[in-house]
Image: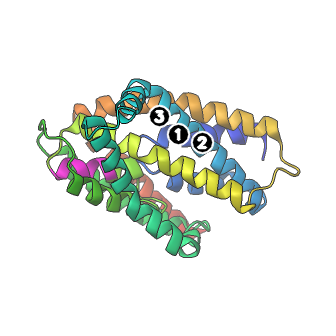
Amino acid sequence: MDAWEAIVLGIVQGFTEFLPVSSSGHLELGKAILGDTSLPEESLLFTVVLHFATALSTVVVFRRDVVTIVSGLLKFKWNEETQFTGKIVLSMIPAVVIGVLFEEELEAFFGGNIAFVGAMLIVTAILLWLADRAKNTGKKVSFSNAFIIGVAQAVAMLPGISRSGATISTSVLLGNDKSKAARFSFLMVVPLIFGKIAKDLLSGELTSESTNFTTLGLGFIAAFVCGLIACTWMISLVRNSKLKYFAVYCVIVGIAAIAVSFVS
């Protein structure tokens, strides 16, 4: 993988991790367009590095929330921070169960099947359109809501289903405040990403042999910087009901991907 390809894929990951257009789907499309010929282990390592970069950007954007949550937990009381953490943990259960029990089945969807990615992008568009029409409220995410949002996050493990789009849309359709929905959506994925990275590192599936660390570094920086921009921007978009524009985008890209799959 060349340096410019790493930067392009880093930019794609940084923006699409937060914007509701499916980062995994766009990475699959990006690799197909760029003709990524890297070995599976190298490609996996690069993907892990990009996801770490966007997780880190989330922590930076929500650093005050993270400090508040940690401070609340250290009081060892059933306070608001502890409850919020409990909801985060509850939301992680569906994705963890699916990821552990159906890991091989999920990996099969990441084999360059751009027709499937296109179809899932259209599903994402429908969710965004429905969420954009919902009225804003002041309701907080409840424990039952957290589990349902977690199910949406598990479904979003499929390439083409936007994680942020699916979780925020589900939360908003459940009647939650749009800003609180976005905050919960972004914070709930951080433990999962770090957990997945730790699992990959401990499994020995990742290899640094013949790895171009300059390329990895460029990809990391691109994903981190773009992640900072996209995360902040997305919060504003959700609050101001601007998701319909991304719904249109997802439909266009989805149809184009399906069309290309038939002619290629």
Q: Are marks 3 and 1 in contact (CB under 8 Å)?
A: yes
The quadrant in which residue 12 appears is top right
Query: What residue would you read off at disc 3?
Result: 58
Query: What residue would you read off at disc 2?
Result: 52
Q: Which residues are magenta?
A: 167-174
Image spot of residue 14 (x, y percent)? 54, 38
Query: What residue would you read off at disc 1?
Result: 55
Q: Main secondary structure of the magenta part?
A: helix
Question: Residue at point 63% right, 52% down?
Answer: 198
Q: The C terminus lies in which quarter of the figure?
A: bottom right
Asked if the stretch drawn in magenta spans residue 263, the answer is: no
Of labels 2 and 3, earlier in sequence is: 2
Residue 5 visible in rendering: yes
Q: CA distance from mark 2 to mark 1?
A: 5 Å
Q: Are marks 2 and 1 in contact (CB under 8 Å)?
A: yes
| In the image, residue 146 above or below residue 11 | below
